[in-house]
Image (tube, grey):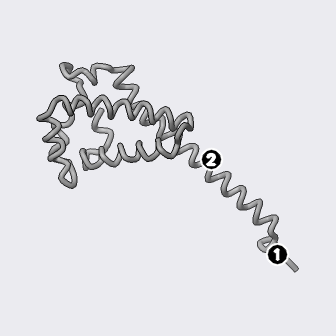
Amino acid sequence: MATIAENPQTQSTESAAAWRLVGIVLLAVRFTQGWIFWGGGSRRFIYAPSKLDPHAASWMANKFQTAMPGALLGMDKVVDYLLHHFVVLYTGVIVFSAAELIFGLFLIFGFMTRLSALVTIGISFVLMLLFGWQGATCID
């Protein structure tokens, strides 16, 4: 006499339901991560463009000076280099902001999802190394 757990059809149905749940969870994570990164980029390009103006008090690179004490694994040297080389700093701010905006949208719409996830995870990792104990949200 076969029990329910031994029935291949029941196992197949349970497996399909589990994979469906995993898919729904990953979709929610993808949307959330996409909105977070799109929000960061859109804040700088659309809602508060003064964050990209080096002459404005709200310029986001002003926050780099506060990153020095919290930087991890020697990233304080990178911050020091950026602060002493304006062109590299300004280019980095624009590229970083554009990557947030673009790859956030890609995650929201499901375009190049794996690449977008890797890029946004990389951005988060670099921010955590740069700002250490302050967290990634301190940049804005």
- For the residue pair 117 and 37, the one nearer the viewer reads as 117
Q: Which residue is pictured at 27% across the width and 23% down the height?
A: 52
Looking at the rendered structure, the kind of residue marked 2 is Ile
Task: Locate residue 74 relative to residue 139 in the image: left or right.
Answer: left
Q: Do tag 2 and tag 1 residues touch (Cβ < 8 Å)?
A: no
**Residue 139 in the image: x percent, y percent?**
28, 36
Extreme-bottom residue of the structure? 1
Residue 62 - label: none
Is disc 1 placed on a helix, strand or loop? loop
For residue 64, what is the image quadrant? top left
User: Can residue 133 be seen at all in this image of the molecule?
Assistant: no
- For the residue pair 77 and 34, the one nearer the viewer reads as 77
The Cα atoms of the two marked residues, 2 and 1, are separated by 30 Å
Q: Point out the image quarter for the C terminus.
A: top left
Q: Point out the image quarter for the N terminus.
A: bottom right
Question: Which residue lies under the disc numbered 1?
Answer: 3
With respect to residue 61, does 113 lie above or below? below
The answer to which of marks 2 and 1 sits earlier in the sequence is 1
Q: Which residue is pictured at 30% across the width and 46% down the height?
A: 126
Q: Which residue is pictured at 53% across the width and 35% down the height?
A: 108
**Residue 43 in the image: x percent, y percent?**
37, 25
**Residue 101 in the image: x percent, y percent?**
42, 30
Extreme-left residue of the structure? 84
Question: Which residue lies under the disc numbered 2?
Answer: 24
User: Can residue 32 be seen at all in this image of the molecule?
Assistant: yes
Looking at the rendered structure, the kind of residue marked 1 is Thr
Task: Locate residue 56 relative to residue 96 in the image: left or right.
Answer: left
- For the residue pair 55 and 89, the one nearer the viewer reads as 89
